[in-house]
Image: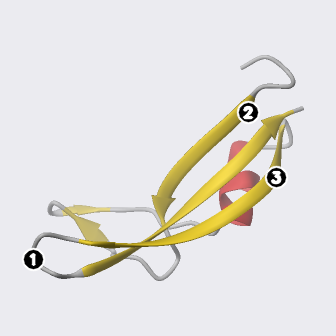
Amino acid sequence: MRPGATLIVATFAPDGPVRCSGLEVVRYSPAELARELGAEFELVRGLEDVHRTPAGVEQRFIWAVLNRI
């Protein structure tokens, strides 16, 4: 990504599921995700989301809006 670009990423929240479709997942807060992406990205905004699966189970996600520095 070139500097000035915006990146929007969704992933499992810290209190989200530990497995999805039988696979282990990695969970992040918006700040943790920004750190994982490195110093080239600045966190602009983090949002929490709760998704209800067809089976009625709640899964917690986060969205992170980041700018490429």
Residue 25 drawn at (x, y percent): 36, 62
- Mark-to-mark CA distance, 1 and 2: 34 Å
Q: Is residue 25 left or right of residue 64?
A: left
Q: Which residue is mark 1?
A: 55
Query: x%, y% of residue 26?
Result: 45, 62
Give the residue number, with chain letter if any, for mark 3.
Answer: 44
Q: Is residue 57 left or right of residue 42?
A: left
User: What residue do we see at 86% from left, 25% from top?
Assistant: 4
Distance of label 1 from label 3 (alpha carbons): 34 Å
Q: Residue at x 21, y 82 (%)?
A: 57
- In this rendering, the answer to whether 44 lies above or below 48 is above
Classed neighbour count for the residue bearing mark 3: other residues with Cα under 10 Å, few (<14), some (14–19), many (≥20)? some
Residue 62: quadrant of the picture = bottom right
SS for callout 1: loop
Indicate which disc, 1 or 3, sits on the residue closer to the N terminus.
3
When the figure is inspected, residue 47 is found, relative to residue 5, above or below; the finding is below
Q: Secondary structure at mark 2?
A: strand
